[in-house]
Image: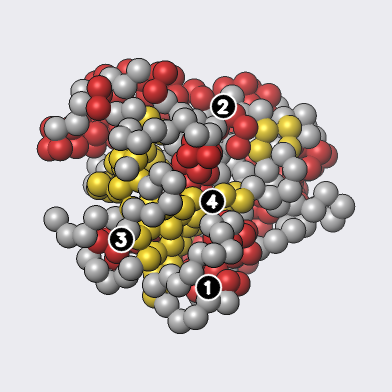
Amino acid sequence: MGIDVYLTRSAAHLPLPPVSNDEMEDLLGRVAGLPSRARRLILRSNGIVSRHYAIDRATGRASMSNAQLTAKAVRALGDDLGQVDCLATGTSVPDQLLPNHGVMVHGELGWPRLEVVSCAGICLAGTAAFKHAWLSVKAGEARRAVATGSELVSPLLMARHFEAESAHRVAQLQERPEVAFEKDFLRWMLSDGAGAVLLEREPVGPLPLRVDWVELSSAAHELPVCMYGGAEKDESGRLQGWAGFDGAQWQERSIFAIKQDVRLLNENIARATLVEPLAEIVRRRGLRAQDIDWFLPHMSSHYFLESAEPALRDAGLPIPRERWFSNLATRGNTGSASPFIMLDELLRSGRVRKGQRLLMFVPESGRFSSGFIHMQAT
């Protein structure tokens, strides 16, 4: 079984004041000077009313890097954090292609030499980092480990990044200048934030959580790419990476924009990331709904919160809605940071009691992966 591992501290950092729905387009900009025709529909569906962007309103530029944002969340764990043996980070969009995000965070923190790992991916990147940190402590390789999830996506959502594509379309196709829906959709869904947790061998602190298990799985063997960036799908639907395009095409086709196949998402997200993997976990681990006091689902939209309820029933774990916790409406969809930010807010609310069990659910639509974390307050 190995060593018991406890989550003893959590923290989050959300940059700058919150941004309301009415402020979003003024801050992110209008492509070709035109308002988005999809914005109101998307916001009405996703249920988000405020979010945070690390964008300087005066300049329209990022006010910090992803590494700096992550370091702020780690420092929020406390000035008395002490020695850490392992730093595991996860993010969808690092500040650079290389070196990895983790070592850049380490550089910002200025900590002494330690093991540093960076997990790539989308929403599941932070959960993968969590698992690495948990396993490091459980295996006895580290006494204390910090895991992070962070996203600095707003610079990629700025209208200026889509101007070249818009102009190219007008010149070549005489079409109305607008961003394709799969790109415009995510401009009104994603935002910035970072979270961090400390994992260690001793159950110290006011309400440590024993981390019982972390399960990750992928459905890429049966499903195509759904959410992607730095790539484009060809006519056959196969994904071609950015290196297969020349520099002019990077701009004309907004290659580095984050895109999502919404139809593919709606058809598969519940089954592939919740029903099927959870049903297997329920069977193998003997989970029962009555034993779960808090269900923390990371969802990109309230639209999917509604579909999650019947999906839980189908998986054999019908946890009632009164035992769910989500802060999507007020914190926004911060991708790999969302689970950390959600957990931190719940713990700080004082609503978790000793003996209660928590189940976190983190889906990722990149190629339909999912993660589950089971913890108990001790």
User: Residue 27 versus residue 260: which sits nearer the camera?
Assistant: 27
Q: Residues within 10 Å of mark 2 (few under 14, many from 20)?
A: many
Provide residue 364's location: percent of width, then percent of height: 40, 43
User: Residue 12 versus residue 265: which sits nearer the camera?
Assistant: 12
Image: 9 above or below 316: below
Q: Amino acid at mark 1?
A: His
Asked if marks 2 and 3 touch (Cβ < 8 Å), the reply is no
User: Horizontal placement of 373 versus 190: left or right?
Assistant: left
Task: Determine the residue positioned at 29% across, 55% down.
Answer: 5
Q: Which residue is mark 3?
A: 201
* Dot 1: element: helix
Q: Which of the two discs, 3 and 4, labels the residue nearer the N terminus?
A: 4
Q: Tell me the CA gap for discs 4 and 1.
A: 17 Å
Q: Tell me the CA gap for discs 2 and 4.
A: 25 Å
Q: Tell me the CA gap for discs 2 and 1.
A: 35 Å
Q: Which residue is mark 1?
A: 106
Q: Amino acid at mark 3?
A: Arg
User: Horizontal placement of 97 versus 319: left or right?
Assistant: right
Q: Which of the two discs, 4 and 1, labels the residue nearer the N terminus?
A: 4
Q: Which residue is mark 2?
A: 46
Q: Tell me the CA gap for discs 3 and 4.
A: 19 Å
